[in-house]
Image (cartoon, rainbow, N blue to C red):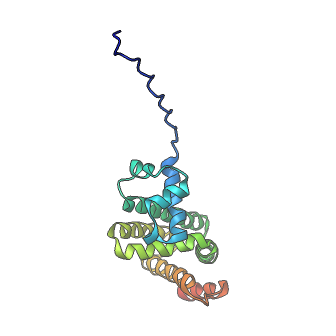
Amino acid sequence: MSGTDTPRPPAPRRRPRRHDPGRRDRLIDAALTVIAERGAAATTHREIARAADVPLGSMTYHFTSLQEVLAEAFTRHAETVARLFDERLAAAPDRDAAVEAVITLVADDLLGSRHDLVLSVELYAAAARDPALRAVTQSWMARSRRALERHFDPATARELDALIEGLVLHSALSTDPMTPQQIRHAIHRFLR
């Protein structure tokens, strides 16, 4: 060692990489929370990362764009609602029970959670502008119709699905939403 050589300080220890296999799913759940609180138009990478309590860089590590995050978040929401349709209608042994299942879907499941109701409305509005999100709503409608077709012919299933969406939007946007009894009456009247 010459007189000009000074010993180098040891290399800083790298922090161990945090193993977080559920982070991507947490980010999608956080995106749904942010969308429900602020709306899809005000949802940002930063807000999602904050809600998930992860570094902002996690967003670009797991997703190529905010549009991808929104599509995956809305797909998760649509899958959750579609699963409710599947479960309720699969459990109905006959058409009369299926009618009751539809009433329960609207009055309790779809209108029972303000969070889910806001997510549905946000999806409808965002899908009106974004073809990628329209594909999410199209897939959701197709799955809902398949569930309804267990008990109703295809034309009735499609029309009933539209009625369900209309009842949900009406209730979400009205200052005087329909009561559960009015929802029951509307569905029975349509299916006569």
Q: Quadrant of residue 174?
A: bottom right
Instruction: Residue at 44% x, 77% y: name it.
Output: 158
- Kindly tell me whether residue 68 is visible in this rendering: yes
Q: Position of residue 20 (x, y in %)?
A: 52, 41
83 and 160: which one is in front?
83
Instruction: Residue at 61% x, 73% y: name it.
Output: 114
Q: Position of residue 96 (x, y in %)?
A: 61, 77
23 and 99: which one is in front?
23
Q: Looking at the image, which residue sits at the far front?
A: 3
**Considering the image in quadrants, where does the C terminus appear?**
bottom right
Instruction: Residue at 46% x, 28% y: name it.
Output: 12
Total numbered badges shown on the rendered structure: 0
**Considering the image in quadrants, where does the N terminus appear?**
top left
Instruction: Residue at 39% x, 51% y: name it.
Output: 60
- Kindly tell me whether residue 82 is visible in this rendering: no
157 and 108: which one is in front?
108
